[in-house]
Image (cartoon, rainbow, N blue to C red):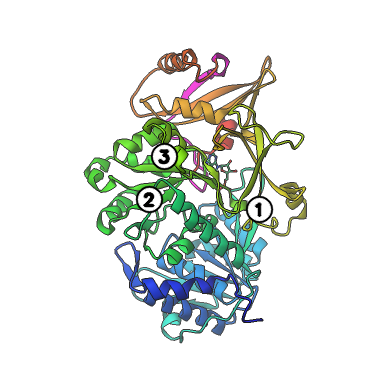
């Protein structure tokens, strides 16, 4: 390789970071605490240990774990030797977990002891796995019936840290599987170059965001590390030198304790996680620690009602948008002088919108004949994108790949309008869109408005087949305080009077639930709700 041709690979994130932030910390619950320098030493030891047990360039190395320091180490160690990190979604049912591991043909698997029984029960399925690297938070021997197993921490201790080889930036670094709302999950892959550029774009995005991130901020990601590299924030963090807190398995009480103890000031998550935190019975006891917490919400629209609820705690929320196929960053709220000079309430609305394209993201919103829609807040089109970090393919699935990439643009399947300032507002997903009497009812707009009724907790609106109209909207709602269906309809009529929704959008029925079903990535599961109808 030509040394002058600097490679955008994951190992190259470290040198400047260690120069300036060597004593910065990475913390796992109240169990482990490493400086960046110690962390880097562990990363290089794990790389060396993996090479020793026979991991080769291009081999898939799977991880089954919650958000731990072991996971964070593998984010770097595995790609740094040219192997491919498979972040397994452990919230899938076991048969889907096994399907993804078979599909990826994982050669080695790093697995937390908690998941061993599940694997051991079906060990015969894994004849393609050459080695199991196991670890536990508990001290002492880990028992397993799996053959060819190694102890992660012992391997680390007995290995010398290596100097990372100079990996070509176009080498695949990661693979993971989409949430699979229809059919089996599909694999998406990302190269070193994509991940490095994406992390840099996150850093640039934060500098334009109204969150005012600075060197004192302490990060704690609340998007699982198995899902879209926790939105790339672990890579970003090492680049920008923040303290990083790893919460393990998500437990709201523990999350609140970590915010308090580690002085967490910045997190990212899907809306349901924020809702769970804000409705935890003990949340008031932590109110003083939540004040000023900067939270990026993505993965689903940030309902206005939830953002208002957070505001009461002094939490600052900002919307962002992306998908598994896009690494994920596509858009975020970027604040320019034009937006900063608006009134507080107008600024609030921009903060919680889908935002504007991130740096290097070429984004269009196009109608059915591929023409860009006007910036009129009304004309709906599909979001299509090009950017340096999008997946090139669905792994081993040329047909689906062709559907995803048409005319050189990645088709998101998300429907949106653009306002006069270029802010994007997603109104629905193509596959969830409700067509009633030949007209379209934007379910996300309706959900947003229903979320503003103070008694409403979470809400999802889905289409039900209707003989006369084709489809009619039905709202599924959880309540913070008990009210009747008639009360909800009455409140919605008020929104009709002020022109925020049209009368025929009012749902035909309201179904109250204790909890809304969630997907493996904690988003409201509309597919499940449709099945119920
Ligand atoms: P996933 O690949 O599971 O992360 O899901 C990606 C999908 O989530 C996108 O295609 C959107 O439909 C939805 N999504 C993500 N972020 C937002 C957002 N800010 N507003 C509305 N929908 C979103």
* Residue 122 appears left or right of 244: right
Between circles 2 and 3, the one closer to the viewer is: 3
Mark 1, ligand 1, within 8 Å: the answer is: no
What residue is pinned by disc 1?
186
Q: Is residue 529 visible?
A: yes
Q: Which residues are magenta?
A: 503-522
Q: Is residue 144 visible?
A: no
The circle on residue 340 is 3
Say whether disc 1 or disc 3 marks the residue closer to the N-terminus: 1
Question: In which quadrant of the rendered image does the C terminus lie?
Answer: top right
Density class for disc 2 (Cα within 10 Å; few <14, some 14-19, many ≥20) is few
**Relative to 189, is 81 above or below?**
below
Residue 17: image quadrant is: bottom left
Density class for disc 1 (Cα within 10 Å; few <14, some 14-19, many ≥20) is many
Q: Secondary structure at mark 1?
A: loop
Mark 2, ligand 1, within 8 Å: the answer is: no
What residue is pinned by disc 2?
212
Q: Secondary structure at mark 2?
A: loop
Magenta span contains residue 512: yes
Q: Secondary structure at mark 3?
A: helix
């Amino acid at each position: 390789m030509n040394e002058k041709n600097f490679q955008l690979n994951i190992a190259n994130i470290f040198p400047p970071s260690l120069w300036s932030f060597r004593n910065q910390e990475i913390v796992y619950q109240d169990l482990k605490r490493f400086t960046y320098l110690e962390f880097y030493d562990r990363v290089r030891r794990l790389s060396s240990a993996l090479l020793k047990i026979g991991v080769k360039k291009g081999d898939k190395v799977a991880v089954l774990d919650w958000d731990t320091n072991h996971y964070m180490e593998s984010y770097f160690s595995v790609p740094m030797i040219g192997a491919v990190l498979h972040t397994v979604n452990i919230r899938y049912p076991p048969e889907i977990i096994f399907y993804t591991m078979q599909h990826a043909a994982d050669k080695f698997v790093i697995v937390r002891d908690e998941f061993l029984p599940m694997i051991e029960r079906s060990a015969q399925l894994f004849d393609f796995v050459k080695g199991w690297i196991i670890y536990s938070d508990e001290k002492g021997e880990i028992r397993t019936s799996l053959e060819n197993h190694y102890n992660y921490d012992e391997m680390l201790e007995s290995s010398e840290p290596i100097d990372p080889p100079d990996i070509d930036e176009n080498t695949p670094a990661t693979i993971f599987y989409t949430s699979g709302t229809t059919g089996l999950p599909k694999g998406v892959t990302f190269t070193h170059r994509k991940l490095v550029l994406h992390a840099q774009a996150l850093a640039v995005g934060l500098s334009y965001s109204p969150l005012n991130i600075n060197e004192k901020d302490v990060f704690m990601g609340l998007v699982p590390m198995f899902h879209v590299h926790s939105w790339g924030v672990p890579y970003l963090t090492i680049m920008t030198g923040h303290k990083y807190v790893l919460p393990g398995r998500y437990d709201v009480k523990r999350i609140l304790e970590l915010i308090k103890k580690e002085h967490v000031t910045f997190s990212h998550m899907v809306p349901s996680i924020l809702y769970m935190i804000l409705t935890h019975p003990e949340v008031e006891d932590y109110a003083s620690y939540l004040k000023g917490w900067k939270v990026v919400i993505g993965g689903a629209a940030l309902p206005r009602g939830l953002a208002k609820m957070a505001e009461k705690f002094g939490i600052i929320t900002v919307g962002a948008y992306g998908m598994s196929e896009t690494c994920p960053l596509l858009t975020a709220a970027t604040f320019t002088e034009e937006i900063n000079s608006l009134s507080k309430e107008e600024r609030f609305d921009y903060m919680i919108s889908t935002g504007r394209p991130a740096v290097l993201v070429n984004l269009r919103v196009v109608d059915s004949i591929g023409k860009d829609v006007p910036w009129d807040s009304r004309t709906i089109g599909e979001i299509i994108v090009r950017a340096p970090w999008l997946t090139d393919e669905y792994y081993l699935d040329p047909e689906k790949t062709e559907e995803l990439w048409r005319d050189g643009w990645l088709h998101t399947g998300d429907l949106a309008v653009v306002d006069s300032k270029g802010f994007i507002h997603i109104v629905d997903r193509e596959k969830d869109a409700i067509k009633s009497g030949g007209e379209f009812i934007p379910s996300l707009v309706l959900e947003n408005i229903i979320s503003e009724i103070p008694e409403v907790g979470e809400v999802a609106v889905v289409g039900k087949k209707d003989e006369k109209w084709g489809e009619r909207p039905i709202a599924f709602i959880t309540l913070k305080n008990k009210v009747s269906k008639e009360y909800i309809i009455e409140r919605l009529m008020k929104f009709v009077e002020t022109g925020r929704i049209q009368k025929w959008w009012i749902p035909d029925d309201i179904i109250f639930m204790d909890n809304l079903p969630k997907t493996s990535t904690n988003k409201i599961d509309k597919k499940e709700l449709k099945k119920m109808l």
